[in-house]
Amino acid sequence: MQIRVLEDKQSLGRAAAEQAASAIRRAIRESGGARIVAATGASQFEFLEALTGIPDLDWSRVEMFHLDEYLDLPSTHPASFRKYLLERLINKTCITRYCLLDVGKDPESAAKRFGKELNERDVDVAFVGIGENGHLAFNDPPADFKTEEPYLIVNLSQTCRQQQVNEGWFTDISEVPRRAISMSVHQILRAKEIVAVVPDRRKAQAAKSCLEGPITPMAPASALRNHPNSIVFLNKDSAALLTKN
């Protein structure tokens, strides 16, 4: 795993976007197409803005999969990750091949269906963030490091749900869904490359725990250190507590 520390959120977003674009170009060059996994949330704003602004990416050759989504939240809700990806990535790039997580009334069956489609071929690059409690996707601590299921139906912790309120997606924690569908930690680590985008001072403790503490289910994103081709992009605020950078 590599760690890069940039000055601010804007430079972090640009650097991570260039790294992601390089991975996409390489996959297209080597195999004719690129398969990506896309994350959402406030931490990804600058990154996706920079990525979608890169002029020479052939998005017609890109297939996108969805990292996680709330259960029991309509796609029209401002906090819907499907809405987020449509507005901030898909519509801007005109990606035509994408899989958004709409589980309907049978989440378990939908999770298996999405997982089967995802694993038809390798993922070239996964974009992820790190939550304030160290979560990776919606794998809250203690995360399941052993399951090989591609997608899981998970219960969201109080800390995770409060983060969504703090970021402005909901006005009160009572509005935040209690369950979600999430790509598993094992599945995320199967990507050929992982680009983690982690800005903001509120992520500093999580960054320290996951990047310098023990690799443990209690710090789910610490699992990124087991991936030989993962890069974590921080800014000075999120890297403030690190001792090795």
Image (cartoon, rainbow, N blue to C red):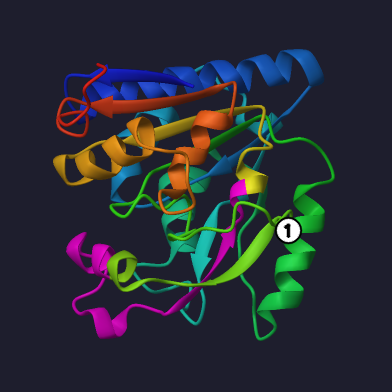
Between 74 and 143, which is closer to the camera in this rendering? Answer: 143
- The quarter in which the C terminus is drawn is top left
Element at label 1: loop
Residue 173 point in image, percent of width and height: 25, 79
- Disc 1 target residue: 149
Residue lying at 47% horizontally and 52% vertically, measured from the top left: 85
- Residue occupying image coordinates x 47% and y 61%: 142
Q: Is residue 228 left or right of residue 205?
A: right
The image shows residue 136, relative to residue 236, as above or below, that is: below
Residue 3 percent coordinates (x, y): 37, 20
Residue 24 occupies quadrant: top right
Q: Quick one: 133 or 162, which is closer to the camera?
A: 133
- Quadrant for residue 101, please give it: bottom right
- Measured as percent of width and height from the top left, residue 223 is found at 52, 39
Asked where in the image residue 200 lies, by quadrant, the reply is top left
Q: Residues within 10 Å of mark 1 (few under 14, many from 20)?
A: some
Q: How many marks?
A: 1
The answer to whether 6 appears left or right of 144 in the picture is left
Magenta region: 162-185
Q: Looking at the image, which residue is at 70% across and 36% down? A: 123
Identify the amino acid type marked 1. Answer: Glu
